[in-house]
Image (cartoon, rainbow, N blue to C red):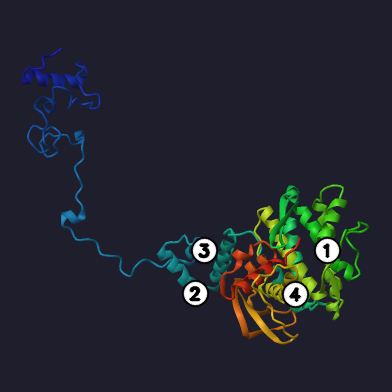
């Protein structure tokens, strides 16, 4: 071992000895041993490049430039005072046709830069083949985007049928008064097609108003279709078609009696098998009424009252929609109201039935105590309530309050009620309490109450 405080000659000899590899003091990372222990860098402290005594100084005679550990910082163009290079004259070179064609896919996906998009769009204005290809790519991109809802537009069937009928009118068209029933049964059938076997047994509660109180009956999805089958059978029997009850004896001809009889006669709870006879019957009804011509006024008996055939078809369309909403709620499926044109006809039927219901409630002692009807001759104007229906299918109706035969008159208006169209229909179906249905009320409060409760009394099982 050498003395760490040896003389310069000894240190120099040690440095030379490091070149022969026999001292062990050399730096393993420096084969020349220039920066090993005992060198001027370690012995004398840090040495600034460019000063005497720094063997790594390239500017010093005899210095070794390869031994520098830290590179010197670069000098930027701005710091060096040099002039910046001039921009390329004339701007960027225009893109070739092949390059622009290859960018069409990225352009359709809006993945091009602003410069590329501008170049592609300028090219499309002058190149017809590329413009056609770009249009096809844009349409394909639109197909790749998943729509917000997978449910078909409720009006799609109507539009398709109208388009087909414009090209080839039917030999025997469906009457206008039967179109709502045709549309609502088709919509319900489409809903039933989408539900699974287990969902046919999902619980459903039928709701209606009876004696100014809410009433309900628990059943299943299949039970609701059985209910529609038996009550639609009233129209079928009127048209000369087979009665779905067959040999089953119903306690009454009323809808509730027929439904209960069908349910009791079933050996097992109704299943999805009930869909086929219901759908076949609805098709037969629509097909048969299309041949009736002017026979739409033949009476259809509901047991304790009658309706002309064209009104009975509207009534069945209304109940089909209401119970379709019950089913959709039970299976957690979206369901839209009828079209505005069909909804208006349903509301009109309810408004025309209100005077008779008001008179029946008075006979049963259910009218307001303060209501004092005046004797009005048939066809003469009497006290009236203005029923304003807003939204789809809306309109205005003057409801005579004193007599079913009286004429509604704006000059004798004593009250005004405003409701949404769908809300009014749900009131008439017994799904909305009368006290909560009116959106706006003005005038005689007792008359308003009577009309709202009469609308709820239109509901039945």
Label 1 packing within 10 angstroms: few (<14), some (14-19), many (20+): some
Earlier sequence position, callout 4 versus callout 3: 3
Q: In this view, does 288 lie above or below 111?
A: below
Residue 119 x/y as whole percent: 44, 68
Earlier sequence position, callout 1 versus callout 4: 1
Mark 4 and mark 3: Cα distance apart in space? 64 Å
Q: In this view, does 309 lie to the left or right of 209?
A: right
Q: SS class of the residue under badge 3? A: helix
Please state which of the two labelled residues, at mark 1 or mark 4, is closer to the viewer.
Answer: 4
Q: The N terminus appears in which quarter of the rendering?
A: top left
Q: Which of 37 and 441 is in front in this view?
A: 441
Label 4 packing within 10 angstroms: few (<14), some (14-19), many (20+): some
Query: What residue does disc 4 label?
Result: 356
Mark 2 and mark 3: Cα distance apart in space? 15 Å
Mark 2 and mark 4: Cα distance apart in space? 70 Å
Residue 91 x/y as whole percent: 34, 68
Please state which of the two labelled residues, at mark 2 or mark 3, is closer to the viewer.
Answer: 3
Query: What residue does disc 3 label?
Result: 108
Which numbered disc covers residue 254?
1
Please state which of the two labelled residues, at mark 1 or mark 2, is closer to the viewer.
Answer: 1
Q: Is residue 362 above or below residue 190?
A: below
Q: The C terminus appears in which quarter of the rendering?
A: bottom right
Query: What residue does disc 2 label?
Result: 125
Earlier sequence position, callout 2 versus callout 3: 3
Q: SS class of the residue under badge 4? A: helix
Which numbered disc covers residue 209?
none
Label 2 packing within 10 angstroms: few (<14), some (14-19), many (20+): few
Please state which of the two labelled residues, at mark 4 or mark 3, is closer to the viewer.
Answer: 4
Q: Which of 402 and 357 is in front in this view?
A: 402
Residue at x 52%, y 73% (from the top left corner):
127
Determine which quarter of the picture holds residue 445. bottom right
Residue 133 x/y as whole percent: 57, 67
């Amino acid at each position: 071992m050498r003395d760490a405080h040896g003389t310069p000659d000894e240190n120099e000899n040690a440095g030379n000895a490091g070149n022969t590899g026999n001292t062990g003091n050399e730096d393993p990372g420096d084969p020349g041993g220039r920066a090993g222990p005992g060198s001027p860098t370690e012995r004398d402290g840090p040495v600034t490049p460019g000063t005497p005594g720094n063997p790594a100084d390239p500017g010093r005679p005899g210095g070794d430039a390869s031994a520098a550990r830290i590179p010197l910082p670069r000098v930027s163009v701005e710091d060096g005072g040099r002039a910046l290079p001039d921009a390329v004259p004339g701007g960027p070179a225009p893109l070739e046709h092949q390059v622009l064609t290859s960018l069409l896919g990225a352009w359709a996906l809006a993945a091009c830069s602003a410069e590329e998009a501008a170049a592609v769009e300028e090219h499309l204005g002058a190149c017809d083949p590329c413009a056609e290809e770009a249009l096809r790519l844009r349409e394909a991109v639109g197909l790749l985007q998943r729509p917000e809802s997978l449910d078909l537009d409720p009006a799609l069937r109507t539009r398709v049928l109208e388009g087909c009928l414009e090209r080839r009118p039917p030999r025997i068209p469906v009457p206008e008064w039967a179109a709502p029933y045709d549309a609502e049964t088709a919509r319900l059938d489409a809903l039933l097609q989408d539900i699974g076997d287990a969902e046919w047994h999902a619980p459903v509660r039928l709701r209606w108003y009876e004696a100014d109180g809410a009433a309900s009956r628990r059943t299943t999805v299949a039970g609701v279709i059985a209910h529609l089958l038996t009550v639609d059978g009233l129209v079928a029997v009127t048209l000369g078609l087979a009665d779905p009850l067959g040999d089953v004896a119903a306690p009454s001809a009323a809808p509730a009696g027929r439904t209960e009889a069908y349910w009791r006669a079933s050996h097992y709870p109704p299943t999805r098998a009930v869909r086929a006879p219901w759908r076949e019957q609805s098709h037969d009804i629509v097909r048969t009424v299309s041949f009736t011509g002017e026979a739409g006024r033949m009476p259809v008996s509901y047991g304790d009252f009658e309706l002309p055939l064209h009104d009975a078809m509207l009534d069945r369309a209304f109940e089909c929609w209401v119970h379709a909403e019950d089913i959709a709620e039970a299976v957690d499926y979206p369901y839209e109201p009828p079209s505005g044109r069909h909804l208006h006809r349903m509301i009109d039927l309810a408004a025309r039935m209100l005077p008779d219901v008001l008179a029946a409630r008075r006979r049963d002692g259910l009218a307001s105590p303060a209501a004092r009807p005046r004797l009005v001759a048939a066809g003469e104007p009497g006290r009236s309530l203005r029923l304003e229906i807003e939204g789809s299918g809306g309109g205005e109706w003057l409801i005579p309050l004193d007599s079913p035969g009286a004429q509604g008159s704006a000059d004798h208006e004593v009250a005004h009620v405003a409701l949404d169209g769908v809300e009014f229909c749900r009131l008439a179906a017994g799904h909305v309490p009368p006290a909560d249905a009116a959106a706006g009320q003005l005038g005689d409060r007792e008359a308003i109450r009577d009309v709202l409760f009469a609308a709820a009394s239109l509901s039945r099982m």
